[in-house]
């Protein structure tokens, strides 16, 4: 075997060893990327797209190194291109994406070169591996960069992109002319606003999303008795933000909105802010909707189709620091903080019981159960968490922890 063939075989061997570490390496790189590049730490959907891009890039890089694929035949992974286009739609700078690739490149080399024996006769292997890895990252960065720029040009030149840009200026407080913004958006910024975030159920195809959002906006406008047409601004191809001007002192009921969407057979999730006044209210209601959306996504499908900020405001404030909230829930609920069916039943019973002023009869009516069943479950729940309701502060502690567990589920609970 000649020297070149030997070097290539050793590079292939290192690549195969990297593949065995893929999951652990991808998880660590995902966390480091979010810590180092704050522009990429957005909502759950964008984090999931980043995770998929990292995983596919690792596999593609390993295959490129293992099989000696010519650089001109290399194509960026589909997940990487999708992520780049979505970042362009979200107005995340391309520099943040390229920095993430440089971080991944450096980390990949750190781990890979540790698998090569540090001897003098291995220098050719090291140089060839570094050269090939650099060729991969340069080619992929070039392709995702082109994809980003093309999507950015398309998005900004579209009506959706222009609206998004104008709205972002209002939200950031950089808009110098509110009246001009109103004309651009065809939406008045005085009065009372309700903002919401909307996204489709997972089984809704991309071809149906635009019609779905349009139909949902009509249902919401009708239910809220909106004043004038809504403002609809896409976040990207699968998510939109909507604002509705509503009568003063309006109350938004999730049950009413949920029934209206169900009657129209619309498979869309809504995270709804509270009615707020003026330009400041326009911003504040959206911020509330964004917090509700994070709770809905973190709860992995536990939440109803429509959730309002009023329902989850305390949890939304606590969930800003999810690791600390999880520690609080585990400490407050003890053995009741297990993510299994039995514990879930006991937690829900105790939550409803406390919510009804510790009334067994009230809880029984709310849950359509016999009073004795409620009493038995409450006793079991308290025994599981080792708490007594006559202890100072315990009722408040339990209610806060139970609400967090109710909305966030496994995100704050212990595995069985």
Image (cartoon, rainbow, N blue to C red):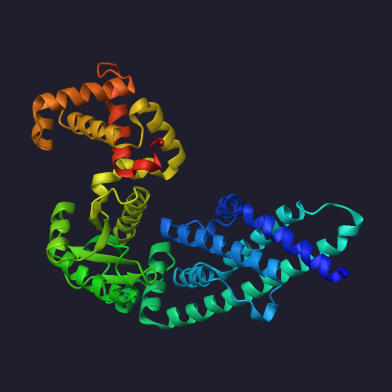
Q: Quadrant of residue 76?
A: bottom right
Determine if residue 340 is in view: yes
Residue 50 lies, with reference to residue 327, above or below; the image says below
Residue in the foreground of this view, choosing between 77 and 239: 77
On the rendered image, what quadrant is the C terminus found in? top left
Q: Position of residue 161 (x, y in %)?
A: 40, 77
Determine if residue 253 is in view: no
Q: Position of residue 5 (x, y in %)?
A: 82, 70
Q: Position of residue 379 (x, y in %)?
A: 22, 21
On the rendered image, what quadrant is the N terminus found in? bottom right
Q: Residue at x 13, y 31 (%)?
A: 363
Relative to 320, 201 lies left or right: left
Q: Residue at x 63, y 76 (%)?
A: 74
Q: Position of residue 94 (x, y in %)?
A: 57, 70
Q: Residue at x 20, y 66 (%)?
A: 266
Residue 9 lies, with reference to residue 372, above or below; the image says below
């Amino acid at each position: 075997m000649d020297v070149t063939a030997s070097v290539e075989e050793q590079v292939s061997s290192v690549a195969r060893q990297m593949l065995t570490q893929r999951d652990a390496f991808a998880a660590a790189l995902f966390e480091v990327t979010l810590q180092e590049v704050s522009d990429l730490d957005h909502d759950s959907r964008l984090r999931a797209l980043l995770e998929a891009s990292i995983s596919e890039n690792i596999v593609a890089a390993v295959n490129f190194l293992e099989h000696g694929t010519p650089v001109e035949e290399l194509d960026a992974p589909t997940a990487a291109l999708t992520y780049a286009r979505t970042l362009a739609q979200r107005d995340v700078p391309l520099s943040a994406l390229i920095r993430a690739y440089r971080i991944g490149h450096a980390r990949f080399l750190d781990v890979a070169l540790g698998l090569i024996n540090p001897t003098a006769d291995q220098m050719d292997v090291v140089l060839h591996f570094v050269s090939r890895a650099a060729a991969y990252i340069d080619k992929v960065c070039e392709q995702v960069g082109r994809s980003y720029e093309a999507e950015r040009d398309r998005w900004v030149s579209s009506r959706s992109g222009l609206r998004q840009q104008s709205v972002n200026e209002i939200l950031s407080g950089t808009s110098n002319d509110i009246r001009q913004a109103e004309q651009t958006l065809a939406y008045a910024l005085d009065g009372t606003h309700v903002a919401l975030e909307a996204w489709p159920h997972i089984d809704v195809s991309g071809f149906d999303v635009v019609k779905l959002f349009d139909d949902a906006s009509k249902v919401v406008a009708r239910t809220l008795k909106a004043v004038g047409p809504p403002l609809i601004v896409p976040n990207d191809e699968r998510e939109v933000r909507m604002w509705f001007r509503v009568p003063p002192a309006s109350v938004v009921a999730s049950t009413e909105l949920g029934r209206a969407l169900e009657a129209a057979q619309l498979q869309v999730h809504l995270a709804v802010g509270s009615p707020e006044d003026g330009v400041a209210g326009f911003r504040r209601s959206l911020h509330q909707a964004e917090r509700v959306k994070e709770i809905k996504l973190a709860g992995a499908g536990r939440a109803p189709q429509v959730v309002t900020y009023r329902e989850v405001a305390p949890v939304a404030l606590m969930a800003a620091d999810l690791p600390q909230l999880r520690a609080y829930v585990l400490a407050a609920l003890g053995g009741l903080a297990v993510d299994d069916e039995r514990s879930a039943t006991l937690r829900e019973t105790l939550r409803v019981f406390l919510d009804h002023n510790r009334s067994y009869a009230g809880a029984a009516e709310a849950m359509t159960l016999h009073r004795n069943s409620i009493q038995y479950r409450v006793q079991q729940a308290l025994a599981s968490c080792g708490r007594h309701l006559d202890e100072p502060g315990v009722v408040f502690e339990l209610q806060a922890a139970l609400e967090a567990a109710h909305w966030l589920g496994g995100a704050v609970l212990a595995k069985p």
